Image (spheres, rainbow, N blue to C red):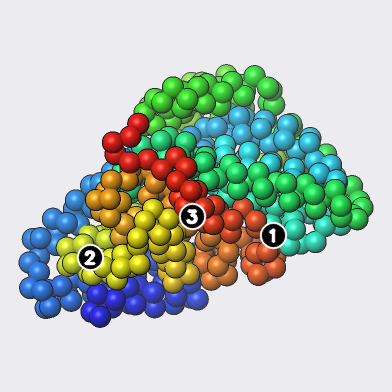
Amino acid sequence: MLSFIPFLVLIVLITCCVVVFGNATLDGASQVSLLVASAVSALIGHFSKRLEWENLEKEITAKIASCTPAIIILLLIGAIGGTWMVSGIVPTMIYYGMQIIRPEVFLVSSSLLCALVSLMIGSSWTTVATIGLALMGIGKAHGFDDGWIAGSIITGAYFGDKLSPLSDTTVLASSVSGTPLFTHIRYMLYTTVPTFCISLAIFLIAGLTMNVSGHGNVAEFMDGLQHTFVISPWLLLVPVLTGVMIARRWPSMVVLFLAILLAVVVALLVQPQLVHQISGEADPGLLTQYKGMMQVCYGSTDIETGIPVLNELVHTSGMAGMMPTIWLIICAQTFGGALTATGQLQDLMRVVLRMVRGTASLVASTVGTALFCNIAMADQYLSIMLSSSMFKDTFRERGYEPRLLSRSCEDGATVTSVLVPWNTCGLTQSTVLGVATLTYLPYCFFNYLSPLMSIFIASIGWKIKRHAEN
């Protein structure tokens, strides 16, 4: 019973943080809550099991050290987000994507466009808060219900977020489970693509059968992009080359670093006026360009397009924008280290593992635990890290490759977070779109079908890898 106390303390603290801080919970309140829960765990371990401080410190240090690659990748992701935006790569993708929207295929086009943008920038939050907000207005003009519009937007945004090598949740899930990033992404295709195809089929049928009218005007949005950036299909060579590097299974850090360098070169050659604008200097010399690109990589950038929604879309935060996530990872690993050192995590695992019999039940337990953490602790990052920590040893002892664990954690945590009204994701998306969580929930087909698909794939044994297999 004592082993449940740190979790109860964390749940209470996180709940209070969500009530008090709302969408700003990740700015520090969640991190402090984790450290307090870690202290409670350490105290219980000291008095009940005579745990020595040196052992606790050693376990916490080991946990944090295991996430060092994730921290480096997150910093690179921050830089690539800024450079790909300012270079015009992402705006070009958005510009051409907007041209496919027509009323009868609006829902499916909305999902595809959000999936494309989210895949390119690695953020469902940014996608929903920018292009998603624009699509809400277009969808309303076409006459679609708010729930359908928001559902199609969220479906696409979380599909792209889940498969993007730039996504912090994708990097986090692969890192804490010990799975190479692109191995993790490729393995998720077996559950993610079928689920997304089912969702697209539903949106397509719904759009073709609904009686809607109106014509969404996207001309202003496209003009804003065209007047701010140099839009050219040649810019798409950078993501193509990045895709080639990924396909050739180059190390993720190498791929991201080279993608940044390519985008920097493109930005200096194609968008020099934007780099100059970001630098804030009057002199357009080489040092000014150098300063501008450095700011794009590490700091916040604002580009004026004349359209408020578009300004939000092209805003980037660089490496500095990744610091709250990195801070959260360190604090969560501290909590995980305390639970491991005190034996409390093992005590909880024994309770859960009594229900595990085979592959399907193991995956179902992992997915269910991740979903429970989303509900109880109101944060997808905590859900990924804690569910991975709880089941990591079990997957290894039973001979399963870590990619099965990382995929199960993402299927249970990343996509379901937006379905919980008090979760940070649910709070954010409902606030941004102006649609209540329970209103869009029935139409987020991808988000609630993903956990079921994960369990189904495990139950039929399709592509379930063990250590002895290739």
Quadrant of res 5: bottom left
Q: Depth-wise, is mark 1 or mark 3 nearer the camera?
A: 3
Of residues 123 and 364, which is closer to you in this image? 364
Q: Depth-wise, is mark 3 or mark 2 nearer the camera?
A: 3
Give me the residue at 56% from left, 23% from top.
240
> CA–CA distance between discs 3 and 2?
24 Å
Q: Amino acid at mark 3?
A: Ile
Residue behind mark 3: 455
First-in-chain label (2 vs 1): 2
Residue behind mark 2: 346
Label 3: which secondary element: helix
Badge 2: how crowded within 10 Å, few (<14), some, or many (20+)?
A: some
Give me the residue at 48% from left, 55% from top.
455
Residue behind mark 1: 443
Where is the N terminus found, in terms of image quarters? bottom left
Quadrant of res 464: top left
> CA–CA distance between discs 2 and 1?
38 Å
First-in-chain label (1 vs 3): 1
User: Is residue 442 something that shows in the picture?
Assistant: yes
Of residues 398 and 173, which is closer to you in this image? 398
Label 2: which secondary element: helix
Q: Is residue 461 left or right of residue 68?
A: right
Q: Amino acid at mark 2?
A: Gln
Question: x%, y% of residue 213?
Answer: 92, 53
Q: Amino acid at mark 1?
A: Tyr
In the picture shown, does residue 144 fall above or below 349? above
Whether label 1 touches label 3, CB < 8 Å: no
Whether label 3 touches label 2, CB < 8 Å: no
Where is the C terminus found, in terms of image quarters? top left
Give me the residue at 87% from left, 55% from top.
210
